[in-house]
Image: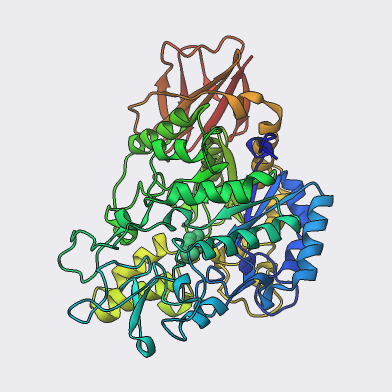
Amino acid sequence: MEQSTQWWKNSVVYQIYPRSFNDSNGDGIGDLEGIIEKLDYLVELGIDVIWLSPIYKSPNDDNGYDISDYQDIMTEFGDLETWDRLITTMHEKGLKLVMDLVVNHTSDEHPWFQEAKKSKDNPYRDFYIWRPPNEEGKEPNNWLSFFSGSAWEYHEPTGEYYLHLFTKKQPDLNWENPDVRQKVYEMMRWWLDRGVDGFRMDVINLISKVEGLPDAPVTKPEDEFQWGSDYFANGPRFMEFMQEMKEEVLDHYDILTVGETGFVTPEEGKQFTNEDSGVLSMLFQFQHMDVDAQPGGQMGKWEEKDWKLTELKEIMSKWQVELFNKGWNSLYLENHDQPRSVSRFGDDGEYHAESAKMLATWLHMMQGTPYVYQGQEIGMTNVHFPSIDDYEDVEIRNLWQDMVVEKGHDPDKILKAIHEKGRDNARTPMQWDSSENAGFTSGTPWLKVNPNYDQINVEKERENSDSIFHYYKKLIALRKEHEVIVNGDHSLIWQEDEEVYAYKREHEGETLVVVTNWTGETIERPWPEDVSFDGASVMIHNYSGAPDASKEGITLRPYEAVVYHQK
Ligand code: NOJ
């Protein structure tokens, strides 16, 4: 079956990080039963699809992104019987389910790796990427792992190193081996035949590495290991492997596929997602997430960078314009790896609600499939735990070990960077109500709850008709009512403005003008000549009362957002 219906173009996706969503049995860890309990909440929000971060068997070195059995459920989360009930209930309620597909690597506890370790001539040896030590008896190359330190781990008994782009408990699979690919396709079909509606493909564009695995260029001479993404991202056989996966699996089901693809440009995005020769429904690009990071790969995110609104405009409008009619965007500001957007791009103090709604308006009025990350719809914020011991994330812990313990960097500076960019910002338990532990668990939560749960929680947000939650509901509903949101083109207004982000969407005589103030100040702007408001109505607005606008211009209050509609 060709992917002809493209239902995912009109859909809104909600991402659940199961460990932190809702704990039904008091062990402090979210679970599948907990998700079932909250499905009606998600129906009320109006979303169409749930993307579940990994729920497979895993020793949890990287919270499930290290899988030891692709065809079974993590014990803490439930079992296959509960999963079947989850998907059946979801389908009955009109919700679709997208699963995480993590096939760049497995856990080192996966039976394939357990076999591969046994000897150099084990049939599974070639499922992974092994190399002998170099002439100096050291790592085969200088690649830095995403999570600090070398990307190679020495295996003493067989005298070789294996490659792990993430933690040493996440060995990279060898996609050059056709048996690996067939095993992955088989597993994908098994889930699809069981009813899943799509896959979010974890770091999928890392599956093909440059032949010979050459050393990365030395950009940081003071460091032992160097950033090698030129040699492992969008590698030479990536499109070939994906075409094969498409022919063998994807084309036979009417599903949503979204590739997590760092290091891609709009040109590559077009290539990967176009309807004729593309391989994915859509992808997650990272350029807008890198706007406040220093260059230099994964480590750059920890270094502060002043950024300008015009830089964000340039990135976003390039994706919007380039993919128009040629590919498909996904729209996101948050996920389980990113800090909370209201803290990062808005104001999580005085203008918390205004700025959370402004960011939502700005994102949801663009072209693409919007993703809402759990808690984003109630404006959950970053957390500032006082001690490194309060953090659980392996990326954070490895960073601390490398930078503070081994290299002696200033602990306060590193803790500050963790407060700003650490992944646990997104992973604190979902805040359901103001009871103990935010109603997430009756036990001890695996990661502490953000102390602001008595102020920010679902119960409060639902009660207040002017809340961020109700605003999200409106935005999601509007997408279903107005074709221009799904199909309109995109052009910037006031391109050079560093405070106001405004854009226009047009489709068959219907126009949207989206105006958002990214500052805590009141600012005035005269309308540009090519924007006409004859007969325009306000579609959505994050302040009560009418916007302060005339034929001549508009006065925007702090973080004000307004969408004008004309038909
Ligand atoms: C990307 C995932 O989103 C992240 O959480 C994970 O640590 C890495 N891939 C490795 O699987």
Q: Report if residue 415 is visible in the image.
A: yes
Residue for point 69% across, 67% down: 22
Residue 414 in the image: above or below residue 548 = below
**Residue 80 x/y as whole percent:** 76, 70
Front residue (pair 22, 117)? 117
Task: Residue at 64%, 44% (x, y): give it.
Answer: 251
Residue for point 54% across, 36% down: 328
Query: Which image quadrant for residue 121?
Result: bottom left
In the image, is residue 160 above or below residue 512? Answer: below
Q: Residue furthest bottom?
A: 157
Q: Is residue 485 left or right of residue 397?
A: right
Is residue 467 visible from the viewing direction of this image? no
Task: Tell me where residue 140 appears, x and y as whole percent.
Answer: 27, 73
Q: Is residue 12 above or below residue 446?
A: above
- Name which quarter of the figure residue 83 lies in: bottom right
Residue 109, position in %: x, y? 53, 80
Nearest the viewer among 538 and 338 is 338
Quarter of the image for residue 4 reads top right
Count of marks, rendered view: 0
Q: Position of residue 187 (x, y in %)?
A: 64, 63
Which residue is located at x 28 percent, y 66 percent? 143
Residue found farthest to the left: 221
Rendered image coloring scheme: rainbow
